[in-house]
Image (cartoon, rainbow, N blue to C red):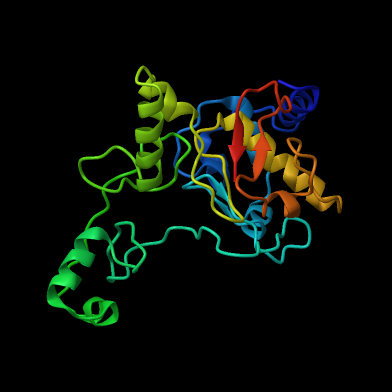
Amino acid sequence: MTGAATALTAMATAVSPAPLTGERAAHVFGDIGVLDEQAVRLAVLVDPRFLAECGWEPAGQILAPPADHPQLGWTPPVGPARAAVTGCVVPGCSRPPGSHGLCRAHRSRQMLRGISVDEFAADPARRALARFGPCLVTACPRDRSGGRVAYCEPHQIRWTRDRRADPGSDEARWRRTTSPVVVTGQLSLAGMPPLITAQVLYGLQQRTRSGATPACRCCGWSWKTCATRRPTPCTPLPGGPGRSGRSARC
């Protein structure tokens, strides 16, 4: 743990000396059961209003600040950018969509009927389908792409490629360490230790309130510049580049 991170934790303990429960930190961790008392103490110091302002999603552990935020904002890159995955356009369907806005099952039925996507989605007879469950990559907030696969489509492709390059790959370790899919303007902290998540959010809160523009410690550029880099914007774990061995990628 760095000196700054240690100082943050010590301050949190001094401010909140009484035992705390994870419920007090639900605005940071959602319904994730956090037992790390240091993480909870620091998370309590993070203002829910700041989290709403910077687009924090506790369920997915994703930071998605609006593009026009005065300090955390970002400029959309020139050319096509990967958009955040929403749901199939059929009302109530929770499965991930393809390029036409329909999940695979609904796309197949739409093509068989020979009607437009809009007509198919508007048909009240269409049945919404349940999600397949989360991708098994620890840092990935996406859903699996099918009932018999373990990953979302991008990670399924990545695992197939990596396993082909190294047949002896440890799949369990790969799941824990591989990065999430890059989405413009988003930083995924999914899979990070709770204390690191609390440190990142509290640090951003304090620097933003001071009027400073947070900078990426990995590349040295401002948040706005780093968030629009290609192919992979980055924010390292505390300890600096080359020492932690892993980055949390936007």
**Up-down: is 104 above or below 197?**
below
Q: Position of residue 155 (x, y in %)?
A: 40, 40
Name which residue lies at 40% across and 22% down: 166
Position of 227 with respect to 170 (left or right) is right
Confirm whether residue 40 shows in the render: no
Position of 26 with respect to 233 (left or right) is left
Q: Quadrant of residue 3?
A: top right
Name which residue lies at 75% across and 33% down: 15
From the viewer's side, name the closer residue of 207 and 218.
218
Q: Position of residue 46 (x, y in %)?
A: 68, 44
The quadrant of the image that shows the N terminus is top right
From the viewer's side, name the closer residue of 126 and 3.
126
Q: Position of residue 153 (x, y in %)?
A: 35, 47
Q: Position of residue 135 (x, y in %)?
A: 36, 41
Position of 13 with respect to 91 (left or right) is right
Name which residue lies at 68% across and 34% down: 199
**Up-down: is 16 above or below 29?**
above
